[in-house]
Amino acid sequence: MSRIEDLEKILERLELTEYERKIYLTLLTSGPLSASEVGDITGIPKFNVYPTLKRLVLKKFVDEQPTSRASKYKAIPPSTFMDELQEALDKRHEKEQTDLKEIATLISKFDLNVEDLRGSSPSDSVWLINSEARIKKSVLNLLKKSEKSITACVPTLDTPIYNQTRQEILILLQSIMKKKKTKMNLILNWELKEGTVDEDFANSISNNGGKIYQWGIGELPFSAFLIDNLEGLIILQSVWIPIPKFGLALWIRHPAYVKPFEKLIQRFNEAGAFKKWG
């Protein structure tokens, strides 16, 4: 393998495109050349030659030399551009170290345990779910995963199809309380009437250590199901008249994003929006 071929392999590893490599090597062996001459020698279409030369100048692989007629372009020797690449790499590394220290200082101000930051990458932290059937399934699956705590804001859902969903949620919550003794805060958006099945569920959950609250300011503007201070579903209702409907759910899969919703619910309670039952 010739030295030119060796150099082309190096340029490829430096992520130069095929046209960039071809033009650089041509300038190295035959330059300085004008853009027109580069096109004639390389066979690269003229409309691609000029933008490619400009990119090579910006990347500091080629030096532009203005003349009275047309600019000439000269390849910067490999040893020179390698020195400049090393210098740029050192500066970038230094900046990354500075940025890392600043980020570490900012993170240290948050009230989060390091072990709570495990799990999803940032790109997977929040997912959208926009099907009523998928939202229902996601709520039930999320609650089944709970181990330590559940905060659930359950909407009215009085029509037959939604009433069935509500009953499934309440039955599951009752079962979880009996089996796992999970810490539970249950906020209901309807009046618990004496002698109803809902009251029986509430009594069962309360008797097993759960806390029941009732939202007392009209319709609950959202539904929320948060588990273990780690993840949750925030459900926005897209239609209110004639009945509320599940419209869109945010599946939050990172504790840093769950905490604001926990704080919001806590603030509602402190402001007297919830009335404790039982």
Image: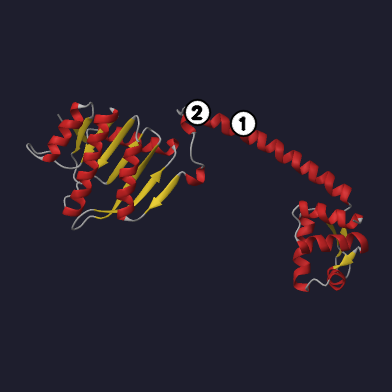
> What is the number of the mark on residue 147?
none
Q: Residue at horizontal 16%, vertical 50%?
A: 158
Residue of label 2: 114
Placement of the N terminus among the 4 image quadrants: bottom right
Q: How many numbered discs, if any?
A: 2
The residue furthest left is 195
Q: Residues within 10 Å of mark 2 (few under 14, many from 20)?
A: few
Q: Distance between the residues labelled 2 and 1?
A: 17 Å
x, y percent for residue 145: 36, 37
What kind of residue is marked 2? Val
x, y percent for residue 148: 34, 29
x, y percent for residue 200: 13, 35
Residue of label 1: 101
The residue furthest front is 179
Q: Residue at horizontal 88%, vertical 62%?
A: 27
Query: Is residue 173 at all visible to an observer of this figure?
Result: yes
Query: Is residue 270 at all visible to an observer of this figure?
Result: no
Q: Report whether 44 appears left or right of 176.
A: right
Quarter occupied by residue 75: bottom right
Placement of the C terminus among the 4 image quadrants: top left
At mark 2, the secondary structure is helix
What kind of residue is marked 1? Lys
Q: Which of 159 and 276 is in front in this view?
A: 159
Quarter occupied by residue 104: top right
Quarter occupied by residue 21: bottom right
